[in-house]
Every structure is written in C-alpha cells, then in structure tokens.
Image (cartoon, rainbow, N blue to C red):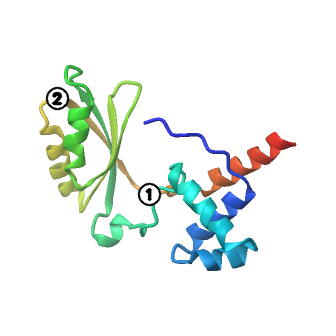
Amino acid sequence: MTAQIVQLDALDAALINLLAEEPRIGVLECSRRLRVARGTVQARLDKLVARGVIRGFGPEIQPASIGYGVTAFVTLEISQRQGHDPVAVHLSRIPEVLEAHTITGSGDLMCRVVARSNADLQRVIDRIVAHGTVARASTIISLTEQIPFRVLPLVAAAAADAVADVD
C-alpha cells in the first residue's frame, strides 16, 4: 500500500506530539495549548486523519502486560503460485501476529509475533506454518526491546525538512 506524502509543518508536528503525549486531550484544550483557534486544530486534525498521517486514537497496549512476554520475528518463505495475499489473510486470523510485511531478501514475509512463553511460541509458529503455501519459517526471538516503536522523532524531522525546504 502506497501512502500519500503529506508535508508537515511545525503546527502539525506540535499537534501530533500533544496528542501522543496526552491521547485523551480534547480539541479545545489542544487549541488553548497550541495558541491557535479551535477550528484550526480541528481542520488540521481532520486533514491528518483523512490523509492517513494519524491512523488511530486507541490505547497502546503492551503485550507483555497482558501475558504475552515473548516477542519474535518470523521470516516466512512461501510458494509463489498463489502470491502473498492468501498467506496474509491466514496470518490476519492469528491474534499473536501483530504485523506482517512483504520483504526482499531470502524470505518473502516478515512477521512480528508474540507468545506467552517459548513453548507457546511453538504453538504460534505451528499455526503460522499450517497454511499450505508456507514452505519454511525462520524465527528470531527478541531478548530485550532497545527502542520501542516510535514515530515522533520522524514527525519532528519531517516538519524540520518542510521548514528547510521553504528557506
């Protein structure tokens, strides 16, 4: 899926940061803190959502806190006859598969999965490879998360790039 490229400015970046820091904050409070009109905040927010920059407002869940303390990355090699879509549909039905990406290199798909234990990880892998077009799976277990998933530094860099392009 190709994303639409959106130029972010300092106000967009400030709004995204504020929402990331305080997800339950209202539009009126955002406008007060950012010192812009409520309508401006609402228009920016609507634009960022419509263009796919902001994809959701739901809570971030830490899998380990709900009993899924093992994170692993699974590279799948698949039979190319049916393509990636049937495998992606299969993977989407497995709750422990948090994300999957088509990749280049020796594998075809890369998945981030979670499990309750190493033994439970075997059960998850068995479910993954149960699809008829999965030829092989290679698993790497994460020992420690050094940098959690993040996008705010990227937002700041994109906004700074937009300012530099104007100068």
* Quadrant in which residue 4 is drawn: top right
Q: Which image quarter is the C terminus in? A: top right
Placement of 64 over or under 112, stated as above or below = below
- Label 2 crowding class (10 Å Cα cut-off): few <14, some 14-19, many 20+? some
The kind of residue tagged 2 is: Thr
Give the camera-side residue of 147 and 165: 165
* Residue 93 place in picture, x, y as percent: 19, 50
Mark 2: secondary structure: loop
* Quadrant in which residue 77 is drawn: top left
Q: Residue at x 23, y 60 (%)?
A: 117
Residue sitting farthest toward the right:
167
Q: Residue at x 12, y 39 (%)?
A: 130
* Residue 125 place in picture, x, y as percent: 20, 45
Q: Residue at x 30, y 71 (%)?
A: 66
Q: For mark 1, what is the residue?
A: 144
- Label 1 crowding class (10 Å Cα cut-off): few <14, some 14-19, many 20+? few
Mark 1: secondary structure: loop
Q: For mark 2, what is the residue?
A: 133
Residue sitting farthest toward the top:
81
Placement of 127 over or under 54, stated as above or below = above
- Asked whether residue 100 appears in the rendered view, the answer is yes
* Residue 91 place in picture, x, y as percent: 23, 44
- Asked whether residue 150 appears in the rendered view, the answer is no
Q: Residue at x 65, y 69 (%)?
A: 39
